[in-house]
């Protein structure tokens, strides 16, 4: 669990994310992407005479479950793996932000810009 709580280097996380797309295409002949769900949702909810939306969207139902898994996983991660350490920023940036009246760096969203309760991160 300790490995998941630490930030991963960009070159490892980016490579893992980038390899998912070709792996799904090669192994399962599945087109991967969150934006593909917009097409599937339009084909499912608004059947029309548009050729682009005339296909069997039920074969791509796995993509809806994928997006649902992302949302559920994000909620679980936010609840079970909270980051209680303040956001680390460069001192020069901190002084520049202080000039704008932003001094709270305890979360991802500064309290001066986002009122309490507007977003919960």
Image (spheres, grey):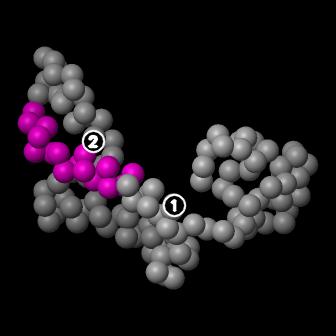
So how many labels did they put on this image?
2
Residue at 39%, 51% in the rendered image: 71
Percent of width and height locating residue 111: 75, 48
Mark 1 and 2 residues: CB-CB less than 8 Å, in contact?
Answer: no
* Image: 58 above or below 46: below
Image-based side of 37 in relation to 77, left or right = left
Would you call the spot at circle 1 few (<14 residues within 10 Å), some (14-19), or many (20 or more)? Answer: few
Visible in this render: residue 20? Answer: yes
Q: In the figure, is residue 86 to the left or right of 97? A: left
Percent of width and height locating residue 98: 88, 52
**Which residue position is annotated with label 2?**
36
Above or below, 120 relative to 90: above
In the image shown, does 116 or 63 lie closer to the viewer?
116
Q: Position of residue 97 (x, y in %)?
A: 84, 52
Which residue position is annotated with label 1?
78
Measured along the vertical axis of the image, is residue 7 above or below residue 36? below
Tell me the distance, in whole angstroms, between the alpha carbons under discs 1 and 2.
26 Å
Quick one: SS at disc 1?
helix
Local packing at callout 2 (Cα closer than 10 Å; few below 14, some 14-19, many 20+) is few
Q: Residue at x 10, y 33 (%)?
A: 55
The residue drawn where x is 17% and y is 45% is: 61
Q: Secondary structure at mark 2?
A: helix
- Which residues are drawn in magenta? 55-71
Residue lying furthest bottom in this view?
Answer: 2
Residue at 83% x, 59% y is 94
Identify the disc placed on residue 17: none
Q: Quadrant of residue 90?
A: bottom right
Q: Main secondary structure of the magenta part?
A: helix
Quarter holding residue 24: bottom left
Q: Is residue 25 within the magenta segment? A: no
């Amino acid at each position: 669990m300790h490995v998941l709580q630490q930030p991963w280097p960009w070159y490892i996380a980016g490579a893992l994310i980038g390899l998912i797309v070709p792996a799904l295409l090669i192994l399962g002949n599945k087109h991967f992407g969150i934006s593909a769900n917009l097409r599937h949702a339009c084909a499912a909810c608004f059947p029309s005479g548009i050729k682009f939306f005339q296909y069997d969207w039920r074969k791509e139902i796995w993509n809806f479950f994928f997006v649902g898994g992302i949302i559920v996983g994000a909620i679980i991660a936010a609840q079970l793996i909270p980051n209680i350490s303040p956001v680390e920023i460069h001192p020069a940036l901190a002084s520049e932000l202080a000039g704008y009246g932003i001094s709270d760096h305890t979360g991802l969203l500064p309290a001066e810009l986002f009122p309490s309760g507007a977003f919960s991160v």
